[in-house]
Image (spheres, grey):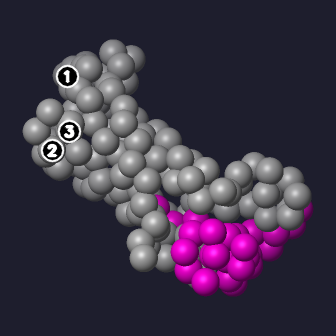
Amino acid sequence: MTTSCDVNLSVPFHDLDPLHVVWHGNYYKYFDIARFALFKKCGIDLYEYSQREKILFPITRSAAKHIIPLRHQDEFVCRATVTEARYKIALAFEIRRTSDDRLCTRGSSEQVAVMMPDMELQFEIPETIQRALGFK
């Protein structure tokens, strides 16, 4: 079973660059919105978890492939899918324009677990997080 979450969004004017397409950095914001919706769907509040367990999940890698630009007021779906949650949390992202279901952007990210306050790398994602994301 693959754990995914779709979020419906639309492009506000302030997300555009001078060419009137979405500025490339805003796609990472859309990915983050979908990421946290996915975590919420799985019952994970990373802020609360970090406060309680003293474990953070920084992003160590991210990528985006821009295929078709989004424009002002385009409605779109950003899907986040968990692809790994044992040694790292890896997510795949897809952004599709709602009007014609065209793929606009693909992306990915990786997160690791680190123990506070020394930021000591943990070599496995905690079991509770693995289970919630469908990997236990």
Kindly identify the residue that appears in the image at 67 percent across and 62 percent down. Answer: 57
Any magenta on residue 110?
Answer: yes
The answer for how far apart the CA atoms under marks 3 and 1 are is 19 Å
Kindly identify the residue that appears in the image at 71 percent across and 52 percent down. Answer: 45
Total tally of numbered discs in the picture: 3
Q: Is residue 124 visible?
A: yes
Helix, strand, or loop for circle 2? loop
Tell me the kind of residue under disc 1.
Answer: Leu
Helix, strand, or loop for circle 3? strand
Kindly identify the residue that appears in the image at 56 percent across and 48 percent down. Answer: 36
What mark, if any, has residue 19 been given in the picture?
1
Q: Nearer the viewer, mark 3 or mark 1?
A: 3
The answer for how far apart the CA atoms under marks 1 and 2 are is 23 Å
Residue 111: x %, y % from top left = 58, 66
User: Is 61 or 82 nearer to us in this picture?
Assistant: 82
Q: Which residue is mark 3?
A: 97
Quarter of the picture containing the C terminus is bottom right
Kindly check if marks 3 and 2 are in contact, taking CB atoms under 8 A apart as contact. Answer: yes
The answer for how far apart the CA atoms under marks 3 and 2 are is 5 Å
Comes first in the chain, label 1 or label 2: 1
Tell me the kind of residue under disc 2.
Answer: Asp
Helix, strand, or loop for circle 1? loop
Residue 104 occupies quadrant: top left
Tell me the kind of residue under disc 3.
Answer: Arg
Residue 19 occupies quadrant: top left
Residue 86: x %, y % from top left = 59, 82
Q: Nearer the viewer, mark 1 or mark 2?
A: 2
Residue 82: x %, y % from top left = 46, 67
The span shown in magenta is: 109-136
User: Is 123 or 103 nearer to us in this picture?
Assistant: 103
Q: Which residue is mark 2?
A: 101
Comes first in the chain, label 3 or label 1: 1
